[in-house]
Image: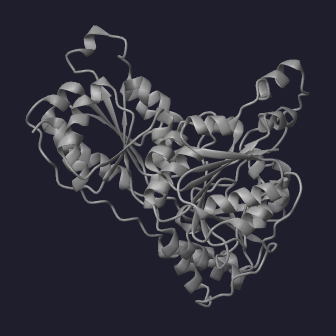
C-alpha cells in the first residue's frame, strides 16, 4: 500500500467521505487511490475557491468536515479566500495540498512555493507528511484537528514521493476532545447580572443560533427582558415560523449604534464583542456603548446550548417560554425591486425546510426582519467578508443535504468570483435555486467611499461600474449547463421562483434591479 491509499482509507475510517477537488500532477497518486478505494464521494470544482467554498457550505450543514484536494501552493492560494470564510464560520475542513517530491524541491521548479507559509495564514493546524509511513497518522491527526471545537481548518501537505512510495499504514480514528463546559460560577455571575434588570444584550453565535440554542436563550430573555442579538454575519441560524426571532446587529454603523444604545451589559455566547466591520475616521470600532460591561458566558469552543440551558435553569425560567410574535406576515408585493419588498416576497415563497445561502451584499441588508415568518429554514452567510461565497456555499450545502431545497442569494459582482460553482451544480444535478441581484455595480463600494468622507469621481465610478459591458447571467448560466431566466419585477420573480421550486435541479434567476 502506498501513502496515497493509506490517506484515503484513513480519511474514510475517520468519517470523512466527501472530497471537493481540483487536482494537478502532484496529486495523481491520490487520484489513483480514489479509483482503487470505494466510499469517497469526489466532486470536481472548476476553480479552487469553488472547492473550498463548497467544503465550507458542506461542513456547516453536515456538522463535520469534507476534504479538499488542491494543487500545490498556487492551488491553495486560489482557494484561500473561502478557507478564510470557513475559518470565520468555525467550519471544519481538511485540506490536502499536493507538493513536489521532497528530493525535487531543491531544484526550485516553477510550482515550488512556501505551501506551509501560505497554509498557516488561514489554518489552525498544518503538517507536512515526511514519508509514506506517516501519511495515515498525519491524516487521522488532521481530521481530529478539524473536528476539535468549535471547528478548525486543518491542512495536510502531501509531497509526491510520500504519496507514491510503498509502506503506507492506515491509522485508526483519533478521539475528538469534548467541548469544554462553562464553570458554574460563570453561570451564577451572569445570572446575578441579569437579575439586576439593567439593560442587557445576549450576543449569540455558533450553536447558540441553532433551534435548541435559541429556545434556551428565549427562556432567559422571557424572565429577564434581555435582548437577543446575532452578529452582522451568521455562520448558520435556525429561522422562520416557530423559531425564536433574533435580529442581527446592523452592518451600517449608525444603525448598529442605535440598536445597542442604552445597553449596560453585553453577554457573549459564542460571539465576539460587537464591532464595526470596518474602521471609519472619527468613528468608534465597538458599536456597544462605551460604558457597557462585556461578559463572556460561553466561548466559541464551549457548549453554548448547554450553558444557555444552565443559565435559564439558574434563573428559574419556564421550560416552554412563549416565542415572541414579531415581523410582518409573508406577502407578495408588486413592482420593481426594493430590498424590503423583495424580503417580504422571499418570506412568502421560501420552501419548507430549505437552506438559504446568502452573499447578497447590499441587496441583502433588509432580509432578516421581513422573513421571520417564512417557512422554517437554515440561513448561512458569508462570515469572513471575502465575497463570492454564496454560489459555492450553496453547492456544498446541497451536497450535504440532498433532500432539501437550497436557495442562493448572490450579488452579481461577488458572484463573478465563483460563477464556476454553477458548473458543479449542473454536473451533480443539485437542487439549488440561484438568485442573482444584478444591479451592475459594486454598490457596497460606492457606499463605503461615501462612508470615509470621499466623493465619487471619474475613477471611482469606473472602478465600481459593472455595466460596460453588461454581465448576462442568463448566458453565463447556460454556458455552465444551468437553465436560467431574467426578471425585472417582483411579480416576475415570484412566478419564476415558484416554478423553479416545483422542479428539481439547478436553476438561476437574474433579477435586474
Q: Quadrant of the N terminus?
A: top left
* Depth check, front residue: 281 or 47: 47
* Depth check, front residue: 424 or 258: 424
Residue that appears at 51% across and 49% down: 395
Q: Quadrant of the C terminus?
A: top right
Quarter where residue 187 is shown: bottom right
* Depth check, front residue: 369 or 123: 369
**Residue 84 visible within the image:** no
Quarter where residue 284 is shown: top right
Residue that appears at 70% across and 54% down: 232
Quarter where residue 316 is shown: bottom right
Residue that appears at 46% across and 33% down: 48
Q: How many marks?
A: 0
Please state if 61 lies on the left or on the right of 144 as rendered: right
Please state if 336 lies on the left or on the right of 420 as rendered: right
Is residue 176 shown above or below 114? below
Is residue 450 shown above or below 204? above
Is residue 468 shown above or below 407? above
* Depth check, front residue: 485 or 3: 485
Please state if 64 lies on the left or on the right of 405 as rendered: left
User: How is the rendered protein coloured?
Assistant: one colour
**Residue 477 visible within the image:** yes
In the rendered image, residue 493, in percent from the top left (x then y), is placed at 76, 55
In the rendered image, residue 354, in percent from the top left (x then y), is placed at 58, 65
In the rendered image, residue 140, in percent from the top left (x then y), is placed at 24, 49
Amino acid at each position: 500500500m502506498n501513502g496515497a491509499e493509506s490517506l484515503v482509507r484513513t480519511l474514510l475510517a475517520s468519517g470523512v467521505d466527501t472530497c471537493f477537488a481540483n487536482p494537478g500532477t502532484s496529486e495523481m497518486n491520490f487520484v489513483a487511490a480514489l479509483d482503487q478505494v470505494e466510499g469517497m464521494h469526489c466532486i470536481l470544482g472548476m476553480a479552487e475557491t469553488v472547492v473550498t467554498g463548497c467544503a465550507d457550505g458542506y461542513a456547516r450543514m453536515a456538522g463535520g468536515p469534507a476534504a479538499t484536494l488542491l494543487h500545490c501552493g498556487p492551488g491553495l492560494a486560489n482557494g484561500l479566500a473561502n478557507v478564510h470564510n470557513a475559518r470565520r464560520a468555525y467550519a471544519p475542513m481538511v485540506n490536502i495540498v499536493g507538493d513536489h517530491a521532497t528530493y525535487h524541491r531543491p531544484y526550485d521548479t516553477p510550482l515550488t512555493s512556501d505551501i506551509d507559509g501560505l497554509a498557516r495564514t488561514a489554518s489552525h493546524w498544518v503538517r507536512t507528511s515526511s514519508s509514506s509511513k506517516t501519511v495515515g497518522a498525519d491524516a487521522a491527526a488532521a481530521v481530529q484537528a478539524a473536528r476539535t471545537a468549535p471547528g478548525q481548518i486543518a491542512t495536510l501537505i502531501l509531497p509526491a514521493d510520500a504519496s507514491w512510495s510503498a509502506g503506507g499504514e492506515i491509522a485508526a480514528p483519533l478521539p475528538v476532545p469534548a467541548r469544554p463546559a462553562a464553570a458554574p460560577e460563570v453561570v451564577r455571575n451572569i445570572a446575578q447580572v441579569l437579575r439586576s434588570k439593567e439593560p442587557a444584550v445576549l450576543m449569540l453565535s455558533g450553536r447558540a443560533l441553532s433551534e435548541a440554542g435559541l429556545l434556551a436563550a428565549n427562556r432567559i430573555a422571557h424572565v429577564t427582558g434581555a435582548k437577543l442579538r446575532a452578529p452582522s454575519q451568521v455562520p448558520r441560524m435556525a429561522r422562520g415560523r416557530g423559531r425564536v426571532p433574533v435580529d442581527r446587529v446592523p452592518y451600517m454603523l449608525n444603525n448598529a449604534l442605535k440598536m445597542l444604545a442604552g445597553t449596560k451589559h453585553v453577554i457573549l455566547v459564542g460571539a465576539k464583542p460587537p464591532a464595526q466591520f470596518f474602521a471609519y475616521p472619527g468613528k468608534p470600532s465597538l458599536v456597544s456603548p462605551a460604558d457597557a460591561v462585556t461578559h463572556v458566558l460561553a466561548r466559541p469552543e464551549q457548549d453554548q446550548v448547554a450553558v444557555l440551558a444552565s443559565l435559564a435553569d439558574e434563573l428559574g425560567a419556564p421550560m416552554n417560554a412563549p416565542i415572541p410574535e414579531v415581523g410582518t406576515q409573508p406577502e407578495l408585493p408588486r413592482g420593481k425591486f426594493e430590498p424590503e419588498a423583495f424580503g417580504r416576497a422571499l418570506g412568502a415563497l421560501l420552501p419548507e425546510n430549505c437552506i438559504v445561502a446568502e452573499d447578497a451584499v447590499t441587496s441583502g441588508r433588509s432580509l432578516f426582519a421581513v422573513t421571520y415568518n417564512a417557512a422554517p429554514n437554515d440561513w448561512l452567510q458569508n462570515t469572513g467578508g471575502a465575497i463570492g461565497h454564496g454560489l459555492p456555499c450553496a453547492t456544498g450545502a446541497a451536497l450535504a443535504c440532498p433532500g432539501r431545497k437550497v436557495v442562493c442569494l448572490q450579488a452579481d459582482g461577488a458572484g463573478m468570483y465563483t460563477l464556476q460553482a454553477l458548473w458543479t451544480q449542473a454536473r451533480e444535478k443539485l437542487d439549488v435555486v440561484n438568485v442573482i441581484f444584478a444591479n451592475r455595480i459594486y454598490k457596497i463600494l460606492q457606499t463605503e467611499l461615501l462612508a470615509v468622507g470621499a466623493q465619487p469621481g471619474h475613477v471611482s465610478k469606473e472602478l465600481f461600474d459593472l455595466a460596460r459591458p453588461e454581465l448576462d447571467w442568463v448566458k453565463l448560466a447556460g454556458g455552465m449547463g444551468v437553465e436560467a431566466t431574467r426578471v425585472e419585477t417582483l411579480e416576475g420573480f415570484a412566478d419564476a421562483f415558484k416554478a423553479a421550486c416545483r422542479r428539481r435541479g439547478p436553476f438561476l434567476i437574474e433579477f435586474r434591479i
